[in-house]
Amino acid sequence: MTIVAEEILKEKLKDKPDKLYIQTLQKMQDGEMSFDLFINTGRITPRELFVHYNPSARLRPDCRDVVRYVGGFYIQILITGDFLLEINDAEQSDEMNSIIKDKSLELVEEELWDRVARKFISK
């Protein structure tokens, strides 16, 4: 089962599934893969709820909320209003181990898509 198919199933099993989210995921599953579709999977989640469902996630102490995306990707929203993406993949080169921090969510999302997400979502 693909990452996208698993996400569709998880959403359908919720008490109140998000139909628009499911439709977006189904487009992705049908091969319509794009930055815009990926970004449309983003959901702002309070830190406490995110940690409850992702206990192994390493969040900075100054993280207030999290924008989570299909595939388990996420961007931290800091109390300063900055958006933070940490890319840590021991199997990748040192270039892949980096921190992207900016006031623009769009810029950080583009980095997430270009550096990591597009490679894993299409599997």
Image (cartoon, rainbow, N blue to C red):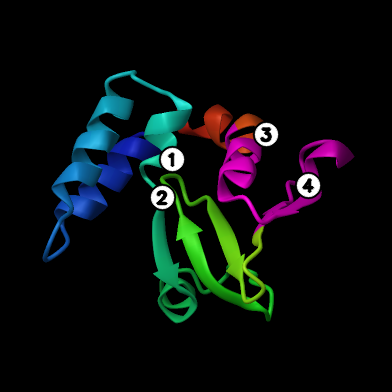
What's the distance in space between the residues labelled 3 and 4, CA to CA?
Answer: 14 Å
Q: Residue at x 19, y 43 (%)?
A: 20
Other residues around mark 4 within 10 Å, as few (<14) / some (14–19) / many (≥20): few
Q: Which mark is residue 11?
A: none
What's the distance in space between the residues labelled 1 and 4, CA to CA?
Answer: 25 Å
Q: In the picture, residue 117 is in which quadrant?
A: top right
Name the spot of residue 113 as percent of width and height, x first.
Answer: 57, 35
* Rendered view: 56 above or below 109: below
The magenta stretch is: 84-113
Other residues around mark 3 within 10 Å, as few (<14) / some (14–19) / many (≥20): few
Name the spot of residue 46 as percent of width and height, x first.
Answer: 43, 75
* Rendered view: 80 above or below 105: below
* Residue type at the position of mark 1: Ile
| Of pointers 2 and 3, the one earlier in the residue sequence | 2
What's the distance in space between the residues labelled 4 and 2, CA to CA?
Answer: 25 Å
Give the residue number, with chain letter if any, for mark 3. 115
Local secondary structure at mark 2: loop
Labelled pair 1, 4 in contact (Cβ < 8 Å): no
| Of pointers 1 and 4, the one earlier in the residue sequence | 1
Q: Residue at x 33, y 28 (%)?
A: 28
Labelled pair 1, 2 in contact (Cβ < 8 Å): yes
* Residue type at the position of mark 3: Arg
* Residue type at the position of mark 4: Ala
Give the residue number, with chain letter if any, for mark 2. 42
Labelled pair 3, 4 in contact (Cβ < 8 Å): no
Give the residue number, with chain letter if any, for mark 1. 39
Q: 55 left or right of 28? A: right
Give the residue number, with chain letter if any, for mark 4. 90
